[in-house]
Image: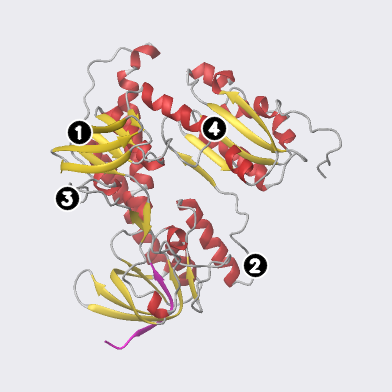
């Protein structure tokens, strides 16, 4: 092994948390190296959040054009050019990558493209993408390794060469019938987008409902909305066998409560969970412990079991969202500066970018029940929001959980137009510890979707007598 090059900081992986810690450390005057296998800036700007939302926005244009008559606009036949869709997406990705390279240059952090394996504590041997090797050693190491799509162990699935989100975003043709394995957020986003582009779409979900961690009324509403667009959803379906080749002709054999069924299609998209990128790179040999699912064990400060080694983002078991990886960076940064911060009791917001979108923060009804937390629940149909009436985007509802013995907001969910933006107001109120009554009495601008929050929180029933009051 070659003599190790010595750095003060080594970052493995250039995702949201990794690149931020690298830029911060380099700008602070520390000699910093970042090792990235392929995606400059991580998965979000290249193969996940940004490109998928880019294509989703294109699919919405196709959908609105086909349905223009209901808005009083006459349009001719609609055709979708997937090569043009891909080109638009690629141009956006190129802009993102260019911006990242500019930020690396400005920060002083050295970006090294290659695959790394730990050869010893805080020492990484890198096989460079353009040939050769480098050995890097550092005083402090940050791991931002990310995850990859899980491939269920089903007979014939691997041989069928199914799509993951990476390949789906590179399609230059429209699948005649897309079979989506997995009824989670990513699977449903792709299902609706391809349906709107013009594909027949079937979603196969092993659990009893799509969106397993959501309340039943939420899952049922999304199920209804997608079904109304012509998407077939087969829940409670155990995948037994796959035949054929994705992109040509495929069939899935599934077991449901009513018996076995064969579902035929042209292409398969697997969206059945994620696996951490922690295998085969020498982590255990250098004293970095993994849990039974392969995620790096960290404490609430995101420190690993090895001294001066930290982990950020999905590989550390953090919620799998870009904004949480960014928050992991802030937690690490502050702890390194001597300001104690923790991942405990973090309020995690998220959105599913179907149309209408789903947005949630805090506890669901089901989570509150499982934890034995008493709550008051209020619900408002989007049809009761004046903005929704004005734009005729009346699908969905808002729902909130309020503590039973005080007036804290415990959770909020919305299925409806602009849900993510409305969520931000509730999330901010929760971060500030505001009473729900502050939102009930707030003079929100009219007519906006957020105005519905006033109507929603005005319905909260009074606390029972004898319960303590909010300070």
The residue to which callout 3 is attached is 159
Q: Name the disc covering residue 300, or none.
A: none
**Residue 342 shown left or right of residue 59 in the figure:** right
Q: Report the Cα–Cα distance between label 2 and label 4.
A: 33 Å
Q: What range is drawn magenta here?
A: 1-12
The residue to which callout 2 is attached is 340
Give whichever of discs 1 and 4 has the lower sequence position: 1
Q: Report the Cα–Cα distance between label 4 and label 3.
A: 40 Å
Query: Residue 367: horizontal and vertical position, in percent?
Result: 59, 43
Q: Report the Cα–Cα distance between label 3 and label 2.
A: 49 Å
Disc 1, SS: strand
Query: Residue 157: horizontal and vertical position, in percent?
Result: 22, 47
Picture quarter with the C terminus:
top right
Front residue (pair 25, 48):
48
Give whichever of discs 2 and 1 has the lower sequence position: 1
Between disc 2 and disc 1, the foreground one is 1
The residue to which callout 4 is attached is 414
Give whichever of discs 4 and 3 has the lower sequence position: 3
Residue 404: name its quadrant: top right
Front residue (pair 118, 99):
118
Query: Residue 218: horizontal and vertical position, in percent?
Result: 51, 32
**Residue 346 shown left or right of residue 53 in the figure:** right
**Residue 4 shown left or right of residue 444 in the figure:** left
The residue to which callout 1 is attached is 265
């Amino acid at each position: 092994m070659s003599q190790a090059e010595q750095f003060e900081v080594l970052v493995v992986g250039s995702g949201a948390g990794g690149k931020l810690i690298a830029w911060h450390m380099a700008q602070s005057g520390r000699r910093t190296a970042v090792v990235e296998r392929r995606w400059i800036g991580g998965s979000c700007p290249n193969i996940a959040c940004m490109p998928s939302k880019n294509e989703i926005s294109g699919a919405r244009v196709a959908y609105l054009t086909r349905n223009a008559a209901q808005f009083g606009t006459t349009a001719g036949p609609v055709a979708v050019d997937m090569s043009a869709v891909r080109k638009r997406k690629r141009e956006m990705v190129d802009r993102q990558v260019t911006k990242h390279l500019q930020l690396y240059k400005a920060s002083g952090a050295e970006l090294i493209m290659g695959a790394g394996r730990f050869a010893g504590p805080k020492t990484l041997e890198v096989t460079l993408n353009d040939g050769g090797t480098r050995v890097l050693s550092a005083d402090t190491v940050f791991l931002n390794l990310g995850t990859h799509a899980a491939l269920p162990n089903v007979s014939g699935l691997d041989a069928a060469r199914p799509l993951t989100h990476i390949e789906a975003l590179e399609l230059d043709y429209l699948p005649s019938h897309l079979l989506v394995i997995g009824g989670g957020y990513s699977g449903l986003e792709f299902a609706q987008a391809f349906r709107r582009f013009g594909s027949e779409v079937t979603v196969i979900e092993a659990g009893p409902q799509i969106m397993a961690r959501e309340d039943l009324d939420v899952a049922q509403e999304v199920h209804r909305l997608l079904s109304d667009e012509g998407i077939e959803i087969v829940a409670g379906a155990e995948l037994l066998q796959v035949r054929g080749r994705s992109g040509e002709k495929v069939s899935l054999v599934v077991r449901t409560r009513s018996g076995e069924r064969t579902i035929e299609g042209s292409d398969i998209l697997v969206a059945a969970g994620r696996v951490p990128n922690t295998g085969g790179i020498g982590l255990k040999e250098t004293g970095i412990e993994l849990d039974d699912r392969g995620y790096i064990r960290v404490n609430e400060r995101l420190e690993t079991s090895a001294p001066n080694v930290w982990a950020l983002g999905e590989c550390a078991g953090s919620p799998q969202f870009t904004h949480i990886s960014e928050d992991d960076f802030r937690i690490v940064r502050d702890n390194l500066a001597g300001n104690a911060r923790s991942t405990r009791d973090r309020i995690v917001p998220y959105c599913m970018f179907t149309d209408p979108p789903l947005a949630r923060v805090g506890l669901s009804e089901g989570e509150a029940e499982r934890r034995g937390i008493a709550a008051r629940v209020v619900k408002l149909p989007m049809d009761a929001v004046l903005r929704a009436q004005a734009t005729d985007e009346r699908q969905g509802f808002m729902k909130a959980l309020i503590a039973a013995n005080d007036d804290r907001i415990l959770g909020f969910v919305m299925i409806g137009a602009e849900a993510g933006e409305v969520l931000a107001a509730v999330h901010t109120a929760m971060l500030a510890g505001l009473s729900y009554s502050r939102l009930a009495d707030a003079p929100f601008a009219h007519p906006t979707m957020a105005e519905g929050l006033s109507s929603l929180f005005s319905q909260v029933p009074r606390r029972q007598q004898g319960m303590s009051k909010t300070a």
